Amino acid sequence: MLTRIDHIGIACFDLDKTVEFYRATYGFEVFHSEINEEQGVREAMLKINETSDGGASYLQLLEPIREDSAVGKWMAKNGEGVHHIAFGTADVDTDSEAIRDKGVRVLYEQPRRGSMDSRITFLHPKDCHGVLTELVTAANPAAHEAAHKDEEDH
């Protein structure tokens, strides 16, 4: 079922300043960045380590690009800080159905596209002891690593 902590999502007001803090303080570098229009965020994935299942663990820094985005609304109430925890899974569809069958509300009827072409869904925080929880099936990690290397070479 769940194989690892995929990432911790951290909401921030200024992505560039927050990236610089994590770079200067901990030495973490940006592995991937993108704008996810559907989610209404600009994000940076900071790779922390490799994992035994071939994936990795990240910090995901999220800056809302719209006030009406889920992260924008959350920040209006809570300010900056830990937004969610994400667990890696080989099959987000099967695992989200199994969790739904246990009475936990799954927020998306069908998984959606997430960072780095992953497939994601979220679990309702009220059903997870106050923690917004994401399930993530990574895109082919080897293909993403090769694409990332190509970006660095150019």
Image (spheres, rainbow, N blue to C red):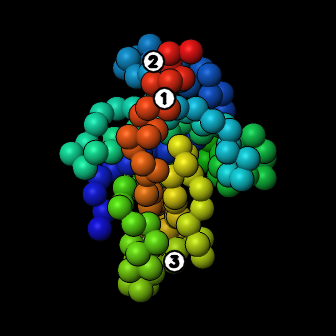
Q: CA distance from mark 3 to mark 2?
A: 36 Å
| Tag count | 3
Q: In the visual, does 66 lie left or right of 143?
A: right
Instruction: Tell me which amino acid carries mark 2.
Output: Arg
In the rendered image, residue 22, in percent from the top left (x then y), is placed at: 45, 22
Q: Secondary structure at mark 1?
A: helix
Q: Which residue lies under the disc numbered 3?
A: 105
Q: Secondary structure at mark 2?
A: helix
Q: Which mark is residue 23?
A: 2
In the rendered image, residue 73, in percent from the top left (x then y), is placed at: 71, 52
In the rendered image, residue 115, in percent from the top left (x then y), is placed at: 55, 45
What residue is at 44 percent from the left and 40 percent from the top? 143
What residue is at 44 percent from the left and 57 percent from the top? 136
Instruction: Tell me which amino acid carries mark 1.
Output: His
Instruction: Tell me which amino acid carries mark 3.
Output: Arg
Q: Nearer the viewer, residue 128 or 31?
A: 31
Image-quadrant location for residue 141: top left
